[in-house]
Image (tube, grey):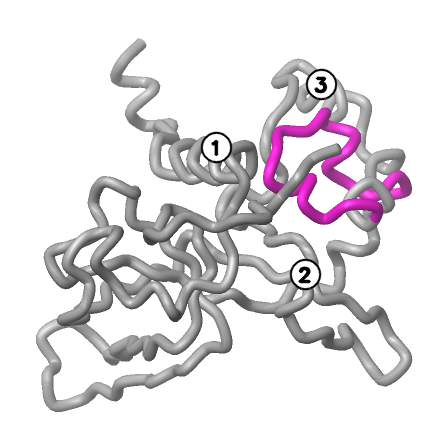
């Protein structure tokens, strides 16, 4: 059985920890160099995830990503609906799509995907398992799918400056709600490394 959270948390902030109480801000601009035409979105999410490596938490800075709701279409795939944290791990090609969608693929497309082998279905997302702290929500209209899985998007990371974050141990530990198990933290590390480590096709051509 895959244990997602530690029963006993460390007295330190760790990569992948779930925190609460942090304000996030995102500037919105019309175009670069147009400093007279912008606004700033301020958000106080219920929970955030630490995306600073453990050894880089400190110097009054930390990187956080807000936990957000899942997409309804994820539940169209029975393999994922059974356990949404499977998105965090590599899957066989036929597991990444709903069965009906897979069956409708052209034979050459199926063969292409099978030749690539296992891989991530959603490279930018990491799912956090259900737990007693996350609020349940409905996907779709009333009476739709109810869940309390949440996720982070690697494209949505914020730098936070906080005077109390001196190092992982000397930090506002009262804001820490959940700590990933060693296995789950390794999965997060592997997936975000893959996300940033992908080589674009144009670079592959030059390398060849």
Indicate the secondary structure of the residue bearing disc 2: loop
Residue 152 % position (x, y): 50, 57
Location of the N terminus (image quadrant): top right
Residue 186: image tag: 1
Question: Can you tell which quarter of the image residue 106 is in?
Answer: top right
Indicate the secondary structure of the residue bearing disc 3: helix
- As displayed, is residue 101 above or below residue 141? above
Most common SS among magenta residues: helix
Nearer to me, 82 or 108: 82
55 drawn magenta: no
Indicate the secondary structure of the residue bearing disc 1: helix
Q: Look at 82% across and 47% down and name the residue there.
A: 77
Callouts 2 and 1 close, C-beta under 8 Å: no
Q: How many angstroms separate mark 2 from mark 1 (CA)?
A: 19 Å
Q: How many angstroms separate mark 2 from mark 3 (CA)?
A: 35 Å
Could you tell which of marks 3 and 1 lies nearer the N-terminus? 3
């Amino acid at each position: 059985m895959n244990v997602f959270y530690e029963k006993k948390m460390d007295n330190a902030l760790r990569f992948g920890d779930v925190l609460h109480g942090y304000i996030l801000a995102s500037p919105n601009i019309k175009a670069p160099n147009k400093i007279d035409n912008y606004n700033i979105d301020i958000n106080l999410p219920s929970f955030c995830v630490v995306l600073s490596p453990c050894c880089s938490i400190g110097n009054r800075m930390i990187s956080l990503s807000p936990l957000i709701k899942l997409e309804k279409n994820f539940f169209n795939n029975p393999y994922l609906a059974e356990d949404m944290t499977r998105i965090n791990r590599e899957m066989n090609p036929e597991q990444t799509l709903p069965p009906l969608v897979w069956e409708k693929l052209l034979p050459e497309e199926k063969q292409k995907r099978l030749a690539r082998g296992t891989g991530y279905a959603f490279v930018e997302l990491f799912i956090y398992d259900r737990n007693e702290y996350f609020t349940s929500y409905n996907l779709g209209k009333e009476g739709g799918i109810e869940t309390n899985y949440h996720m982070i998007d690697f494209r949505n990371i914020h730098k936070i400056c906080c005077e109390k974050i001196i190092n992982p141990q000397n930090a506002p530990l009262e804001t820490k709600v959940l700590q990933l198990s060693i296995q789950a933290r390794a999965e997060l590390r592997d997936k975000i490394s893959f996300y940033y480590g992908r080589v674009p096709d144009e670079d592959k051509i030059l390398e060849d």
